[in-house]
Amino acid sequence: MIEAREGSIELLEGKIKSKEAKVGIIGLGYVGLPLAVEQAKVGFQVTGFDLNSDRVRMINAGENYIGDVNSGEFRELVVEKLIVATTDMSLLTNMDVLIICVPTPLDKNLIPDLSYIQNVTGDIAAHLRTGQLISLESTTYPGTTREIIQTRLEETGLRSGIDFYLAYSPERVDPGNKRFGTRNTNKVVGGADPESLRVAVGFYQQAIEKVVPVSSTQIAEMVKVYENTFRAINIGFANEIALLCDRMGLNVWEVMDAAFTKPFGIMPFYPGPGVGGHCIPLDPHYLEWKAREYNFQTRFISLAGEINRKMPEFVVDKAARVLNIDSKALHGSRVLLLGMAYKGNLDDYRESPGIDVYNLLQLAGADVVFHDTWTPHVKEHGMDAHSIDLSDAELRKADLVILITKHSNVDYERVSRLSKRILDTRNIIKSDHSNVTLL
Ligand SMILES: NC(=O)c1ccc[n+]([C@@H]2O[C@H](COP(=O)([O-])OP(=O)(O)OC[C@H]3O[C@@H](n4cnc5c(N)ncnc54)[C@H](O)[C@@H]3O)[C@@H](O)[C@H]2O)c1
């Protein structure tokens, strides 16, 4: 039994240590569901909140829909009632800890769309009570937690660090990564005030091996966008070198593989058909947008974004050149895209460069189809198509096969044997086949 004043920091910390704290996770997608599992595994009673009633129903039926979640482990936690889900936001008030994992997309003009965070903040404000910890994990620009969440929650009359506790702790999950998951990926935590940091660090230490405290929520927010921007810029640079090597008639893959043998001062980043997913194409623009408020131009970010967004056009240009070898035009040619997910062995096609390549090929008059068992139906950015079977007949029929994503369930040796022409944008087929052209 915990002896501490109702609503006090000691009471909350005591509940966290004894696992009596009730944990609410808002937004049960790629980030929220794995997090719910990790928290339930250490013994917390977790309630998942989502507006999507299908997802809520599936969770309560023990049906997993996220690749990184172990289905057996998940079902057991549901059966033991350590994980339940609801669409009823009035239950937020029963939670001791609330973790926000809702989307942070960009609108059509590459402007941050914070409406999800604003909506959730409104729900929390409506049910806020003393002694709750609220932690934002969605990726966003530095200042969001303070400017949007703290301001709104304090309009209730309750204050951060006294009545409730507020933190930002970026989710760093790398979907599909078998070595690093939620538990063994270091967790950066920033508090709105010293009390909030203390409570948040104590909470995250229960389920995560190493917690890295930083001095404010803004620093923690900047850490996350810096990390993802670092990747976007390095991929952009690799893509720029690929464009130059194409002009100079050099094999960019040979250049990179040799460069990455240097044991220090360099890190592998490879070119490709463009960037996809919910992070790399979007997050740098959150920083770019915020920088404008300070009359500051983030030139590296703009340039990398420009190059990365142009890559699908380059793929289509190169496809036209490959077809030229056989005196064919894009118009009327059958083009088969292999892989539509933005990353190998994943079912996520959000912002996938394959979608742009598909749409551009259609515009050019090609008869374009795709195969990807991970994404059987792709419906985004004007594309609405189903994966076809990768039969011998389909491979023989295509005038050109373009390799977009490397999945381990595709036999690329068979693909290279049966296809007339292949454009390999990922250096998947390493052997010297005369019908293969590299990006
Ligand atoms: N996917 C990744 O690899 C990854 C990695 C690190 C960080 N992030 C960040 O984490 C955040 C979430 O991303 P995700 O990929 O998990 O998104 P997602 O789209 O997979 O899941 C978000 C969930 O939030 C729900 N939701 C939306 N509005 C809601 C509301 N008002 N109340 C309750 N639920 C609501 C949606 O129905 C959905 O189930 C984003 O900010 C993203 O940038 C994502």
Image: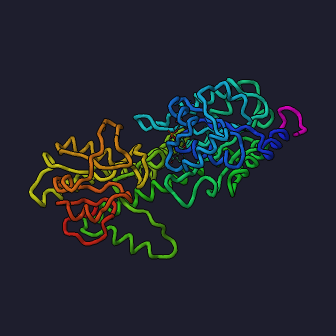
Magenta stretch in the rendered image: 1-8
Residue 124 image-quadrant placement: top right
- Expressed as whole percent of the image width and height from the top left, the position of residue 206 reads 73, 50
- Residue 428: % across, % down: 33, 64
In the rendered view of the protein, which quadrant contains the C terminus? bottom left
Residue 313 lies in the magenta stretch? no
Q: From this view, report whether residue 61 is shown above or below residue 358.
A: above
At a point 24% along the width and 46% down the height, the residue shown is 369
Q: Main secondary structure of the magenta part?
A: loop
The answer to whether residue 11 is seen in the rendering is yes
Q: Residue furthest right?
A: 3
Residues 30 and 242: in front is 30
Q: Residue at x 53, y 35 (%)?
A: 58
Q: Nearer the viewer, residue 90 or 239?
A: 90
**Foreground pick, 306 / 395:** 395
Q: Taking 385 as reference, is 343 left or right? A: right
Residue 24, relative to residue 417: is it above or below? Answer: above
Give the quadrant of the N terminus.
top right
Instruction: Tell me: residue 303, above or below residue 106.
Output: below
Looking at the image, which residue sits at the far left? 327
Q: Is residue 135 visible?
A: no
Residue 438 lies left or right of residue 203; in this view the side is left
